[in-house]
Image (cartoon, rainbow, N blue to C red):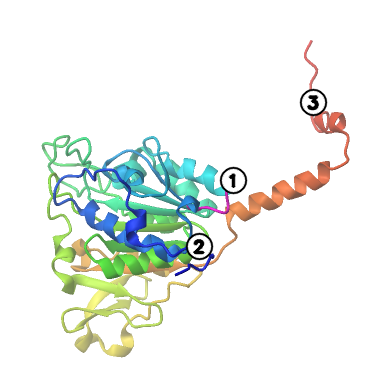
Amino acid sequence: MSGGNGTSALTAKDFKSDQEVRWCPGCGDYAILNVIQGFMPELGLERERIVFVSGIGCAARFPYYLQTYGMHSIHGRAPAIATGLAVTRPDLSVWVVTGDGDALSIGGNHLIHALRRNVNLKILLFNNRIYGLTKGQYSPTSQLGMVTKSTPMGSLDYPFNPLSIAIGAEATFVARAIDTDKKGLTEVLEAAARHRGSAFVEILQNCNIYNDGAFDYVREEKQNRIHLRTGERIRFGAEEEKGVVQYADGSLRVVDVEEAGENSLLVHDATQVQASLAFALSRITFETDSAVPLGVFRSIERPVYDDLMGQQLDAAREQSRGGDLAALFHSGDTWKVS
């Protein structure tokens, strides 16, 4: 059997490395790893053309467990390192694996600039609302008042909303999935892989040691999941008795369908160029509406940083071809130091 590129078709087993997987028993990362290993053959690429770059944290062990190229880089800097790789090797499929602490604390600056530039890479942020590797300190997504080893009287910090940050940074692809939802996570990864430009995926992930049950209200209670599908009215619930409507001020709220009426429900459109709808959807949380949207929030096309840089380099080479190197060095403002 042959893949689309003429190579032998790969299977999930081909993407499992010989390294022992070493996370705490019951960690949500196992489920995510299993889905990613199973999804990789769908790319139709040789393993040598796939690269995973990670920072520091529990999630950062991913490159060891995937039979692809990989780099375990430094805290928070995975997007910057992946940017350098993506723009110099456009033939590669570049993925970043990071956590809520790694990406949104020390790495926040690198994350937003990779997204705004629309570099052709995929960023997977595992959000468990805690620092797991360093044993239970609060993270940028920990809830207000959360008691941890570093906040014994409760956190005073208002938490980040990862999707709101990504959309605010003008990411061209933004999505969310859950570690235990194999079908939903696979669908989101497939959409992210097809997208050309920066793709940001938040994956709700359980840390059963330091923050067990953080997302049980949507992992276990499936009626609280709002599945977003472009072109369809947003309905959810055990009997699809609930829906989402848009108010005059642009905000979105969950309503009872029978009371509000079917025609009042919002029709999802991830391809809407303006980011306002995707941002409003990101503000629907369990704390505000007892529900959590999942799926693709935004997917638009915009010039890709890698292509723009390549065009500039080609133009510079053309301008300098046959030119006077000494004249080039002395063009513009120059100074003589004696």
Q: Is residue 198 left or right of residue 40?
A: right
User: Whole-percent x and y of residue 155?
Assistant: 18, 42
Mark 2 sits on what residue? Answer: 7
Give the residue at x 21% y 43%.
22
Q: Is residue 155 magenta?
A: no
Picture quarter with the C terminus: top right
Question: Crowding at label 1, few (<14), some or many (≥20) Cα neighbours within 10 Å?
Answer: few
Mark 1 sits on what residue? Answer: 88
| Sequence-first disc among 1 and 3 | 1
Q: Amino acid at mark 1?
A: Thr
Give the residue at x 87% y 31%.
327
Question: Crowding at label 2, few (<14), some or many (≥20) Cα neighbours within 10 Å?
Answer: few
User: Whole-percent x and y of residue 83?
Assistant: 51, 45
Give the residue at x 58% y 52%.
90
Picture quarter with the N terminus: bottom left
| Residue situated in front as seen by the camera: 215 or 9 | 9
Answer above or below: position of 22 versus 12: above
The local secondary structure at tag 2 comes to loop
Q: Is residue 44 left or right of residue 314?
A: left
| Residue situated in front as seen by the camera: 206 or 60 | 60
